[in-house]
């Protein structure tokens, strides 16, 4: 069946961009630059624990609880180092501010294979394009630094929307921004519940980026699965 699509919305992290190295390694490297020895593996474990707890306590970067996303992140970074044994408050503040800034730059991010080519081709085919991402306000800068921002008419973060995927209201905002009805739009992402299932629940089409060999997780019709981003064009060619 021909999909009559006008709008494509995109997740970013692990769909278009991924971290060049695990968080624990980046954090440990920055600590070393400031004369502190911290084990990357320990830092990685601390970060996952702290990030999980902070996300539960202050969902969507503390939106509606009086936190800025910047403060949310500074707290996560400092607490990750504290759990890993760093107690010097002045050092923690310096580390947190530096790392918060560093994750805006392209040296911590790399494009997934096929990302630039696929986005360029989709634009050539005349699709309207936007981002729908559970991210904070740094995303605009990150996309610009990684030379992807120009592909998109809009960048909708959960921080700006006030709702995070899988909440259908973030997709409703995206459809308004993109000027499309749900059945005219498709969302592309790597997370089954937040991207694939949530977009479908909002009445959109969606495609799940799932690398070959990552067959774990719920069954998805094969025509909705993208082994790589380059597979998208065959699914949506007008």
Image (cartoon, grey):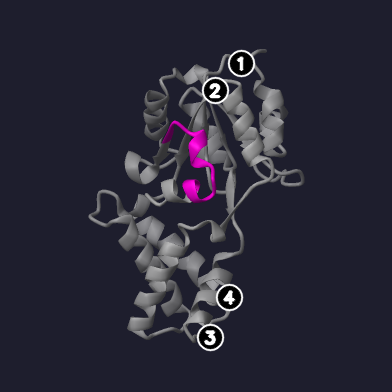
Q: Are marks 1 and 3 in contact (CB under 8 Å)?
A: no
152 vs 49, nearest the viewer: 152
Q: Nearer the viewer, mark 2 or mark 4?
A: 2
Who's the residue at 62% across and 39% down the image?
A: 116
Residue 127's disc number: 2
146 in relation to 170, above or below: below
Quarter containing the N terminus: top right
Q: Nearer the viewer, mark 3 or mark 2?
A: 2
Who's the residue at 71% across and 39% down the image?
A: 228
State the image quarter where residue 53 is shown.
bottom left
187 with respect to 167 (left or right): right
Q: Which residues are magenta?
A: 143-154
Residue 3's disc number: 1
Residue 37's disc number: 3
Task: From the image, tell me which residue sits under label 4.
Answer: 40
Sequence-wise, the earlier of marks 3 and 2 is: 3
Image coordinates of residue 219 in percent, x first then y, are 67, 35
129 with respect to 78 (left or right): right
Sequence-wise, the earlier of marks 4 and 1 is: 1
Sequence-wise, the earlier of marks 1 and 3 is: 1
Q: Residues within 10 Å of mark 3 (few under 14, many from 20)?
A: some
The residue positioned farthest toward the left in the image shown: 66
Q: Are marks 4 and 1 in contact (CB under 8 Å)?
A: no
Question: Mark 3 to mark 4: distance in Å?
Answer: 9 Å
Q: Are marks 3 and 2 in contact (CB under 8 Å)?
A: no
Helix, strand or loop under label 3:
loop
């Amino acid at each position: 069946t021909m999909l009559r699509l006008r709008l494509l919305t995109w997740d970013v992290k692990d769909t278009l961009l991924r971290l060049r190295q695990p968080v624990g390694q980046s954090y440990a490297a920055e600590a070393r630059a400031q004369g502190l020895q911290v084990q990357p593996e320990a830092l990685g474990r601390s970060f996952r624990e702290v990030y999980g707890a902070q996300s539960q306590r202050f969902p969507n970067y503390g939106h509606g609880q009086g936190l800025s996303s910047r403060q949310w992140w500074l707290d996560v970074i400092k607490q990750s180092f504290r759990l890993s044994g760093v107690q010097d408050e002045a050092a923690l503040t310096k580390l947190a501010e530096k790392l918060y800034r560093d994750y805006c730059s392209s040296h911590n991010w790399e494009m997934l294979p096929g990302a630039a080519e696929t986005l360029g081709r989709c634009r050539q085919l005349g699709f309207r394009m936007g981002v729908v991402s559970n991210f904070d306000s740094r995303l605009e800068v990150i996309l610009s630094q990684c030379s992807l921002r120009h592909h998109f008419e809009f960048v909708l973060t959960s921080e700006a929307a006030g709702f995070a995927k899988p909440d259908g209201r973030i997709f409703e905002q995206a459809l308004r921004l993109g000027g499309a009805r749900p059945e005219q739009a498709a969302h592309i992402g790597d997370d089954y519940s937040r991207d694939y299932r949530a977009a479908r629940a909002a009445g959109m089409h969606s495609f799940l980026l799932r690398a070959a060999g990552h067959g774990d997780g719920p069954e998805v019709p094969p025509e909705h699965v993208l082994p790589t981003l380059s597979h998208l064009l065959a699914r949506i060619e007008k």
